[in-house]
Image (spheres, grey):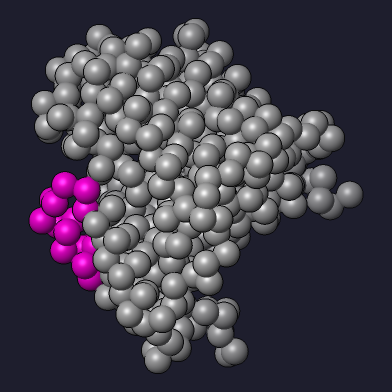
Amino acid sequence: MAGLVGFFTIAYIIAVNSFILAESGMPLEGAMIATILISFVGCLLMGFWANAPILLVPGMGINVMFTYTFVHSMGMDYRTALTLVFISGVLFVAVAFTKLGAILNRVIPQSLKVAITVGIGLFLIFIGLEKGAIIDRGTSSMIALGDLSDPKLIATVLTLLIALVLFLRNITGHFLWAMIAGTAIAALFGILPDGSGNEEISLASYGDVFGAWSFDSVLSMAFIVGTFSLTMVTVFENIGLVQAHTAAAGRPEKAERALQATSLSAMLSGLFGSSTPVATAETGAVIAAGGRTGLSAVTAGILFLLSIFFIPVIQYIPDNAVAPILLIIGGLMVQNITDLETSDLTEAFPAIFLIAMIPFTQSIADGVAVGFILYPLLKLASGRAREVATPLYVIAVLFILNFAVYLV
């Protein structure tokens, strides 16, 4: 029962993740199959390797990083980005199966960890507003309020209100029900997708996704910086999530193997054709429903595999049904700003600029780079150089070299 509850709580990820990946040029049906398969494999790995009730599915924020940072901002195609995901996953495995995880967790300042989460949250909100037609490019400003008479905007607002009510009332499967409601509203407004999806399941498009690697740009500075940024985001997000979930389940001893299962799933995601999975926050619903062992994760994984038969239906979900999910999840991530230390300006300023630069540059990698450069610089300028660990100076120099390449 806990696995069943968990699946319906997180099932929305099949549509949301697929639509975001499709904007990278990946075929939509192939992205759906990849999302389903990596969720299936990830949950089975968690169940059998760690015996923990944690759901592993493609992470919100990381999928945005894949499409909008690596592809749109850095100019990679989705095949190169999948190669980057795989190599980042290999690095994550090295961290999870050695003591590197503890070392990295110790040398990276808490303020920067918090800032990364908040910045990604703001980026999700920005994308949700744009996808739902609530904002648009302005004529006298960079961004302006969308056309209030646009049926898409009205449908998005109505869906958002429904999603917020369901979420605040803690209705099981709230996001899934909200997406169904949003699709019904779109049908009433006559703005459903044009029906370009296939009526039958076809694996043909998945051939363009599975193992679709391109190693042409692996030695470029953009690829190296992107790999490092994704690894940092993935490692720190999952360390926090895994520790929180295993503690909530009363099984903190399972944290090490749960992180290892997560890292293996991250590595395989590049092969299966998806962005990197995380130990999703919706695992809280599994634990609240009584899940304590890997049986919950295995049950959810099997349900993910069975959902492959619903791909033809999923393709008709409109943007106004997806945008509110991005807005709410982004808002939840921004809440972490309360953990930011603001009294010490050498801690606060790097974090604030990191947070601002992610949505403003529409690049998570560039935002992270700015934060990691400013932090040691401000510590040096204030005569507190010893507060910065040596690896952080090395990271800052690498980011500076990355920016310097564009000046040559």
Residue occupying image coordinates x 27% and y 25%? 299
Dominant SS of magenta comes to: helix
Q: Indicate the position of residue 215 as horizontal and vertical percent values.
A: 80, 31
Residue occupying image coordinates x 52% and y 50%? 200
Above-or-below relation of 362 to 202: below
Residue reaching furthest to the front: 200
Residues shaded magenta: 160-174
60 or 379: nearer the viewer: 60
Q: Left or right: where does residue 400 sit relative to residue 42?
A: right
Residue occupying image coordinates x 35% and y 67%? 183
Q: Indicate the position of residue 49 as horizontal and vertical percent values.
A: 37, 10
370 or 181: nearer the viewer: 181
Q: Left or right: where does residue 108 sit relative to residue 335?
A: right
112 or 6: nearer the viewer: 6
Residue 374 in magenta stretch:
no
Decide if residue 404 is in sight here. yes
Q: Quadrant of residue 377?
A: top right
Decide if residue 81 is in sight here. no
Above-or-below relation of 215 to 370: above
Q: Indicate the position of residue 91 as horizontal and vertical percent values.
A: 59, 20
Above-or-below relation of 72 to 50: below
Q: Left or right: where does residue 390 sit relative to residue 175?
A: right
Residue occupying image coordinates x 64% and y 49%? 26
